[in-house]
Image (cartoon, rainbow, N blue to C red):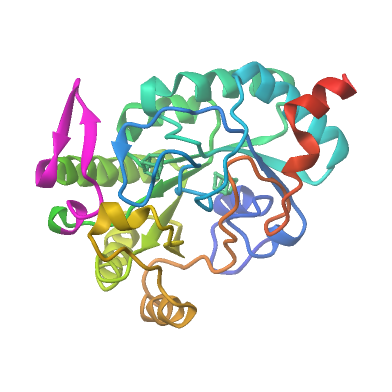
Amino acid sequence: SDGPADMAPDVWEKVKNHPCYSEEAHHYFARMHVAVAPACNIQCNYCNRKYDCSNESRPGVVSEKLTPDQALRKVLAVAQEIPQLSVIGIAGPGDSLAAGGKNSFATFEALAKHAPDLKLCISTNGLALPDHVERLKNYNVDHVTITINMVDPEVGERIYPWIFYDHRRWTGRDAAKILHERQMLGLEMLTSAGILAKINSVMIPGINDEHLKDVNKAVKSRGAFLHNIMPLISDPAHGTHFGLTGQRGPTAQELKLLQDECEGGAKLMRHCRQCRADAVGLLGEDRGAEFTTEKIEALE
Ligand code: SF4
Ligand code: SF4
């Protein structure tokens, strides 16, 4: 089809087969995550490092870490079984662009060679993003997700205890300020490069809930295509990071109210299912367990 009347044809080309960017496509096209990125360059208070990056996934589930070579084999095996597979994403378990994005780019390289029809997609906290926009463009990556939880370092210092940047560790407000500036720069660079940017925000009651309205405005003004506000999934381990009383997640009502209040700003994604970093299948469906490395090796 030609796509919605209010969407430019080149944008529609990038949206129509991507289940995360199009509410329509999410019924027909499948995505798969390959967990090739083990390292992270920041610490989020809601991450306890035992599980996947909450950029794109439900914390609390350990996904199977893969080398770029294992990832390629898994993708080829899954593509045989799931013909609707259209997108391969890298979303963890750490940050896809930490450590120079070495594994992520090696995976893209292999996929571009052996499965050129699949769309490539990446999710990042944004700290290293400005260094890699050009390279992403060269691999025809049309979709990048940045997790942005604040646009004010005062809020940020309650979410991020530290970042690792420019060969050293930064803490407190300085850390949050650098992260914020890099996220905004990365988003602006994506927009100028014609790469669609989706922004994920984790709604943390009492920390950034009201503030996410400002985040919505800030990302809209820098050209974000979609804003996905996700609830913090509370985990007993978060208590120790956020304060002695623990940190709850928002109720479904609180989430919906905030999403409604952001209406009119950057377009909201409402069909997100917070899939795992190694999810396989249609959104809301996870066939990952059918495609463990062990099973793929048995098939080969
Ligand atoms: Fe954890 Fe992801 Fe935050 Fe890194 S960016 S600390 S992996 S939630
Ligand atoms: Fe969808 Fe995010 Fe995965 Fe890309 S990285 S396929 S946008 S869930």
On the image, the x and y values in percent for residue 91 come to 52, 39
Query: In the image, 224: left or right of 106?
Result: left
Determine if the magenta segment contains residue 59: no
Q: Quadrant of residue 283?
A: bottom right
| 156 in the magenta segment | yes
User: Which residue is at the front of the view, 168 or 115?
Assistant: 168
**Residue 20 at x, y = what percent?**
60, 55
Q: Which residues are magenta?
A: 155-174
Residue 286, placed above or below residue 245:
above
Left or right, 63 with reference to 50: right
Q: Residue at x 66, y 16 (%)?
A: 69
Quarter placement of the N terminus: bottom right
The residue that appears at 24% across and 40% down in the rendered structure is: 182
Q: Residue drawn at (62%, 67%), measured in percent from left and top? A: 4
Q: Position of residue 214 (x, y in %)?
A: 25, 67
- The correct choice, above or below, for 65 with respect to 264 in the image is above
